[in-house]
Image: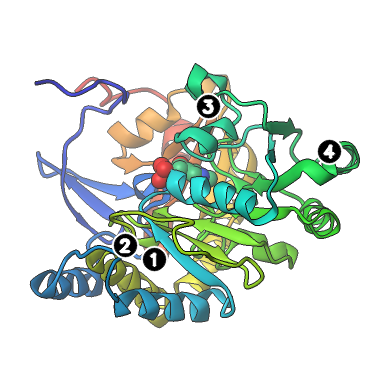
Amino acid sequence: MKLFDVYPINNITITKALGSHVWDDLGIKYLDMYGGHAVISIGHTHPHWVERIEEQLRQIAFYSNSIKIPLQQELAKKLGEVSGKMDYQLFLCNSGAEANENALKLASFHNGRKKIVAFSKSFHGRTSLAVAATDNPKIVAPVNETGNVIFLPYNDEHALEQCFVENGNNISSVIIEAIQGVGGIIEATKSFLRKIRLLCNDYNAVYIADSVQDGYGRSGSFFAHDYAGVHADIYTMAKGMGNGFPIGGILIAPNIQPKHGMLGTTFGGNHLACAAALAVLEVIETEDLIEQAKQRGDDLLKRLATIEGINNVRGRGLMIGFDVPEELKDLRKNLLYNQHIFTGEAKPNVIRLLPSLALTKEQADEFMNAMEEEIAAPTLKGGAR
Ligand SMILES: Cc1ncc(COP(=O)(O)O)c(C=O)c1O
C-alpha cells in the first residue's frame, strides 16, 4: 500500500531531536526555527516531558471518558493557573480543527443561532465547520460549503459593525486568530479585538479566540488575545499544548453551561495526553518560557528589522514573519539545505519563524548569522540532494 500523497515534502528524514535541534538519518544536525509547525513549545524530547509520559505509560495510557480521570482535573487546574483563566471550564479533544469545531458548535448550542463571522486569510482547520470558516476555497469541499459563514475583512471595524447591525441577532459566534498564522503573521489591532468583544456583548454572540497557533505562550503572553486586554468566551488550543503529543482543548467562560452529551470524544483527555500536557505546563512555568519567548522574540524582531533585503518584519514573541522579495525567493530552501535551518512559510512569499519557546540566545544568533550569510550570497548550493 502506498501513502495518500497530499503533502509536498522535503527530501529529509528526521530521526532524532533534542531542544531546538533535530538530526537526520545521515547525522546532519538542523536548527529548528519552525517547531514542526508551531508544535514544539518546550523543546523536542524535553526530559521532564519524556519522563512524565514514560511514567504514565507504565500505569495506564487510556480509558474512556466514562470514568473519573483525575489527571484531567489536574490539567484544568494547572492550565487555569498558567493562563490566568481560573474560572473557565476545560473540554479536551485531540487537534486544532477539532477544538474549533467544538467551539463553533458549542456557541451555537449556547445561543441557538447559526451564523458565524470569520475573517479574510483565516485558517481554522480542515473539519467541516472549521474549514467552512477558513478563507481558502481550495480546501473547502462542496459538502463543507455553507451559507452560515460570513467573511469580513480582517481589522475592518466598520465592516464588523455593519455586519452586526444587519445580522446581529442571527450571529452565533465570531472566530478570530489574534495573529493569523497560515495567513502570513498578520496581527489584529487591539481596537479590533475590543470591538469584537463589545459587539459580542451587545448581541449575545460568542467570541472565539482561535489560539491554536498563537496561544500557549508563543506570542509572549499565554494567549495572543491577552495583549488587547480582552477576554474571549472560548479559547481554542492545540499545537503547543502537548509539545508534539496530540492534544487539543477549549477553555470555556463560566456563563456557558454544559449539558451531558453536548460534546464528546473517544480519545480526548486520555491519561497519556493529559500527562504530556501537564509536563508542558510544568516546564513553561519552571523555565519561565513565556517571558523567555517574549524577550527572545523582541530581540529577533529588532535584529531582523535591520537586515537589508527582507521586508515587513512583524509578529510577537516567537511568532515572527517577514516578506521575502523575488530575488531572494530561494532563501527558505537555502536556509534549509545550506545552513541546515528549518523555517516555516506562508504563501506566497512569507517566511514564518515558530521555534520552541526555549530557543536560546546562541541559537537565535546562529539563525541571524545564517540569514546574513544567505542574503549576502543567495545561491542554492545544497538544494539537490
Ligand atoms: C490558527 C489555527 N487553527 C487551527 C488549526 C488546525 O489545527 P490542526 O491541524 O491541529 O487541526 C491550525 C493549524 O495550522 C491553525 O494554525
Q: Which mark is residue 167?
A: 4
Vertical position of residue 177 compared to residue 271: above or below: above
Front in this rendered view, residue 123 or 66: 66
Amino acid type, callout 4: Asn
Secondary structure of residue under mark 3: loop
Q: Which mark is residue 347?
A: 3
* Disc 4/disc 3 C-alpha distance (Å): 32 Å
- Between circles 4 and 1, the one closer to the viewer is 4
Question: Which of pointers 3 and 2 lies earlier in the amino acid sequence?
Answer: 2
Question: Which of pointers 4 and 1 lies earlier in the amino acid sequence?
Answer: 4
Vertical position of residue 356 compared to residue 2: above or below: below
Q: Residues within 10 Å of mark 1 (few under 14, many from 20)?
A: many
Amino acid type, callout 2: Gly
Secondary structure of residue under mark 2: loop
- Residue on which disc 2 sits: 43
- Residue on which disc 1 sits: 358
Image quarter where the N terminus lies is top left
Image quarter where the C terminus lies is top left
Q: What residue is shown at x 35% (from left), y 75% (from top)? A: 283
Q: What residue is shown at x 50% (from left), y 41% (from top)? A: 352
Whether residue 241 is visible here, answered yes or no, is yes
Secondary structure of residue under mark 4: helix
Q: Residues within 10 Å of mark 4 (few under 14, many from 20)?
A: few
Percent from the top left, x then y, of residue 29? 20, 47
Left or right: 92 in relation to 150: left
Q: Residues within 10 Å of mark 3 (few under 14, many from 20)?
A: few
Task: Determine whether label 1 and label 2 are within 8 Å by CB.
Answer: yes
Percent from the top left, x then y, of residue 369? 42, 48
